[in-house]
Image (cartoon, grey):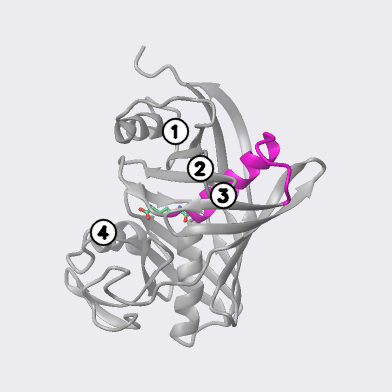
Amino acid sequence: MKFTKMHGAGNDYVYVNCFEETLPEDIASLAIAVSDRHTGIGSDGLILICPSEKADAQMRMFNADGSESEMCGNGVRCVAKYVYDHGISNQQTLKIETGAGVLSLDLELAGSKVSQVRVNMGKPILTSAEIPTLLPGDPPVNAPLEVGAQTLEVTCVSMGNPHCITFVDEVNDHWVHGIGPQVEVHPMFPRRVNAEFIEVISPAELKMRVWERGSGETQACGTGACASAVAGVLTGRSERNVLIHLPGGDLRLEWADNDEVFMTGPAVEVYQGIWRGTQ
Ligand SMILES: N[C@H](CCC[C@H](N)C(=O)O)C(=O)O
């Protein structure tokens, strides 16, 4: 199976072009195997670039534990780069079908290749039943969440996939590795959740680390950055335009007046290879 390794702000996935490749039936097992950083290719998960009836391509995304997610912000930028750079479409505005609907993406080129992508990520989902969370509020804003002996104040937002945002004084390993895994599987989140920890540098600048559902800490999370930008506005901490610093790079976010969230960030192709499985 041919594959391409790509990343967006250090959030790295194995990409397979399903216009050409045929996959085994058990995609969850394939995602677990390729993602392993010792015995596999090494990635935060597996992303399939598939034909679509209503867009230039369809994205399907699997976490490193094999679970399928509805959406992936860094992934969809890389899918757009792949679609353009590999000649699936020659348009500089693309439509990609995701679990969060058909998204529109504007490509920025460096020479003949895509370097940055601006994505219309659509409107955030702010009703607790749809996020989904059992916490009260549509959406829950500064809601108490008991984790061990601590009570966090969390704000929940879905960008197609669920996010739980906690603003903290200092983003450190205690939050990401100590609290993150407990938030991920907290009974208040029936489909589990991605946990973001945010330090406010200024109303226009946030620092973020994430514990992702199904993959653990990653260098960046595009949907998490969108959800955090929305949470910053909902809690009165930040402006509708913010720059978010993540361990793997920066993402620019705007929650526009028409309620749509726009994310701009890099997309990088690292290498191509052939996966031989367990041969
Ligand atoms: N890193 C991705 C999100 C993956 C989310 C996934 N862990 C989930 O289960 O929802 C992003 O850039 O948006």
| Mark linked to residue 42 | 1
Q: Amino acid at mark 1?
A: Gly
Q: Amino acid at mark 2?
A: Asp
Q: Are marks 4 and 1 in contact (CB under 8 Å)?
A: no
| Residue 249 horizontal side relative to residue 157, left or right | right
Marked residue nearer the N-terminal end (2 or 1): 2
Q: Amino acid at mark 4?
A: Arg
| Mark linked to residue 55 | 3
User: How far apart are the two marked residues, 2 and 4, measured between alpha carbons?
Assistant: 21 Å
Which SS class for mark 2? strand
Q: Is residue 172 magenta?
A: no
Marked residue nearer the N-terminal end (3 or 1): 1
User: How far apart are the two marked residues, 4 and 1, measured between alpha carbons?
Assistant: 23 Å
| Mark linked to residue 192 | 4
Whether label 4 lies within 8 Å of ligand 1 gets the answer yes
Which SS class for mark 3? loop
Q: Nearer the viewer, mark 2 or mark 4?
A: 4
